Amino acid sequence: MPQQTDTRERVLTAIRTAHAAPSIATLAAELGLHPNTVRFHLRSLHEEGLVVEERQPTGGRGRPRVAYRTTARGARSGERNYRLLADILVSDLAANSPHPTAAAHTTGRHWGRRLADGYEDYDATLPRFAHEVLAEMGFEPEAQPADEPEQLLLRNCPFRELVDSHQQLVCALHGGMVEALLAGPAHDGPALVPFATPSTCAVRLPPPR
């Protein structure tokens, strides 16, 4: 399956970057693929609304030449590098803000409030909401203990590579976000405990009200 996905992406990229809408024969020659293989992936791309057929007259009596071009959606399907954008923004904050850690923490709180506002019935006093938000973001939270949790152990950090170069800022951003999700610091202290163990962070939950 991964190999088929890679080949399909090659076909889509070749169409997107072509100077003129290519035919199956043109794509097969350019990519070193059998025409039937190209045809198979074109069918999939067409069904997903990423490419459309284009009939081009040949100037003779034969049938029109069938070529392919990307739809508006297909034209926006190139490679993304959000990690690069995040690195640029964090590096700029570190270099140009007079108080980068405080600014990161404030930004995190704003972010956390926006996340909470996305839930119609969000209740900061219920740990399950923070657990759900953090799980959707990829933190892999684990409630400890499971029945009446006092903390969430975070087994993954979606920002891990940025932590390697900007730990203080990234943890401040994350900490502000968590505090907003919990409607304030837990236990009159920081809600986030970075690297509570060598491989995990922890979110301290406020006591039940």
Image (spheres, rainbow, N blue to C red):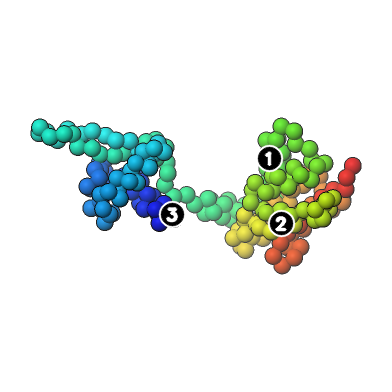
Which quarter of the rendering shows the C terminus? top right
* Residue depth check, mark 3 versus mark 1: number of the one nearer the observer: 3
Determine the residue positioned at 71% across, 53% down.
141
4 left or right, relative to 35 = right
Q: Earlier in the sequence, mark 3 or mark 2?
A: 3
Determine the residue positioned at 9% across, 33% down.
60
**Amino acid type indicated by mark 3:** Met
Which quarter of the rendering shows the N terminus? bottom left
Of residue 25 and residue 178, the one placed in the foreground of this image is: 25
Q: Earlier in the sequence, mark 3 or mark 1?
A: 3
Q: Is residue 91 visible?
A: yes
Q: CA distance from mark 1 to mark 2?
A: 18 Å
Q: Which residue is mark 2?
A: 154
Q: Is residue 109 visible?
A: no
SS class of the residue under badge 3?
Answer: loop
**Amino acid type indicated by mark 1:** Leu
Q: Earlier in the sequence, mark 1 or mark 2?
A: 1
64 left or right, relative to 129 = left
Q: Is residue 17 placed above or below 33 in the rendered structure?
A: above
Q: Is residue 39 placed above or below 192 in the rendered structure?
A: above
Q: CA distance from mark 3 to mark 1?
A: 35 Å
Determine the residue positioned at 67% across, 60% down.
167
Q: Position of residue 5 (x, y in %)?
A: 41, 51
Q: CA distance from mark 3 to mark 2?
A: 31 Å
Of residue 94 and residue 1, the one placed in the foreground of this image is: 1
**Amino acid type indicated by mark 2:** Leu
In the picture as drawn, the residue positioned furthest to the bottom comes out as 198
The disc placed on residue 200 is none
Q: Which residue is mark 1?
A: 115
Q: Which residue is mark 3?
A: 1
Q: Position of residue 83 (x, y in %)?
A: 54, 54
